[in-house]
Amino acid sequence: MAMPAHTERSPTDGGAGGPAQAGTARETDDAARAAALAQLARPYGLLFWVAVAAVIATLVRIAFFTPIEASQGPAQKIFYIHVPAAVTALYLAFALMAVASVLYLWLRDPKLDRVASTSAEVGLAFTTVVLVTGPLWAKPVWGTWWSGDARLTSTLFLWLIILGYLILRQAVDDRAQRARYSAVLAILAGLLIPFIHLSVYLFRTLHPRPIVLKPSAPSLPPEMLTTLLMSFASFALLFVALLLARYRLATIADEGLADGGAAARGA
Amino acid sequence: MPPENSGYAYAAYAAEITVYTVYVISVWWRGRTLAARIRAATGADRSRSERDVTAA
């Protein structure tokens, strides 16, 4: 049931154009494959290594150059990796996924489907960091690893929906159908973003309320705010670098250079 | 005096680094697998075209 990726590009069939045209098509295809191989040999460009350096610098600043909060102790520093990962996942990755999905349903451009799916995948990695680091902060501060309140439960629910989204993409062979189904699911997942943000206001929760993303001024001392902003910037940069690397891979897979479109489902 | 709970912070850093590293390696690995398939397809195309020339 797999759809051929590019039926117009069949350089080996000879076709009605004769051997000369077939030869030209083969050369074009070889050039495309050579370009793809060059990209795959170095999936991470300069931006990725800049992002890695920024994340390492941020971790060093968090560990050694940011004051320890008096009441929570060193565990409070988890905040500097938990919050930026959450903000990146919700307001960059999943927001981009939802917007690209809406645009896909309107314009039917496969590039938008690729943006949505790659953004969802990278966002899932960031949300995993959120769901792992949150309990590591909660245990020493709340005395429990997990609380079934609205913020935590809805974030876990979103993580499961995105996981389902990626599984759905592997389960549907027809490219257009897969893009359409997953766009609908991505839009539904995107509707959870404002709910998750407002959950700490709408319900009685253990989870703290925002201290930066709120209408009034951030309630953090300047050294802590600087570390948090540095962390926001470095995680956003890492997100963009990973998104670009993953998008390039998805584009090459979708071009059907490996095995007539079957590769599109593998990467 | 703040409480001593730095172990949780270090565990969180380690978990974060692990998750991102695993993801980065998974993208690199999928790229490598795709590259191998492209190389195999190129080889298959070449041998097929050589057969065509021989047959002609």
Image (cartoon, coloured by chain):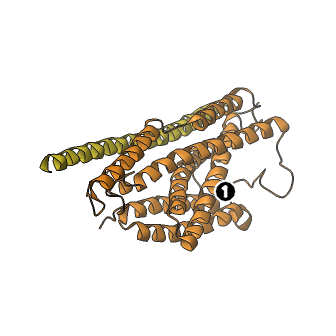
Disc 1 target residue: A91
Relative image position of residue A174 (x, y in whole percent): 37, 68
Residue A15, placed above or below residue A130: below
* Dot 1: element: helix
Q: Residue at x 46, y 48 (%)?
A: A249
Q: Quadrant of residue A231?
A: top right
Residue A148 shows in the view:
no
Q: How many marks?
A: 1
For the N terminus of chain A, which image quadrant? Answer: bottom left
**Identity of the residue furthest to the left in this view:** B55
Chain appearing in orange on the rendered image: A
Residue A106, placed above or below residue A204: below
Relative image position of residue A111 (x, y in whole percent): 52, 60
Chain letter, disc 1 residue:
A
Mark 1, Cα crowd under 10 Å, few <14 / some 14-19 / many 20+, is some
Residue A54, placed above or below residue A238: above
> Could you tell me the amino acid type at mark 1?
Tyr
Q: Is residue A224 left or right of residue A164?
A: right
Q: Nearer the viewer, residue A25 or A132?
A: A25
Chain appearing in yellow on the rendered image: B
Q: Nearer the viewer, residue A130 or A226?
A: A226
Q: Quadrant of residue A81?
A: top right
Q: Nearer the viewer, residue A195 or B21?
A: B21
Q: Quadrant of residue A225?
A: top right
**Identity of the residue furthest to the right in this view:** A217
Relative image position of residue B26 (x, y in whole percent): 43, 42
Q: Is residue A241 left or right of residue A3?
A: right
Q: Nearer the viewer, residue A92 or B52?
A: B52
Relative image position of residue A189 (x, y in whole percent): 56, 66
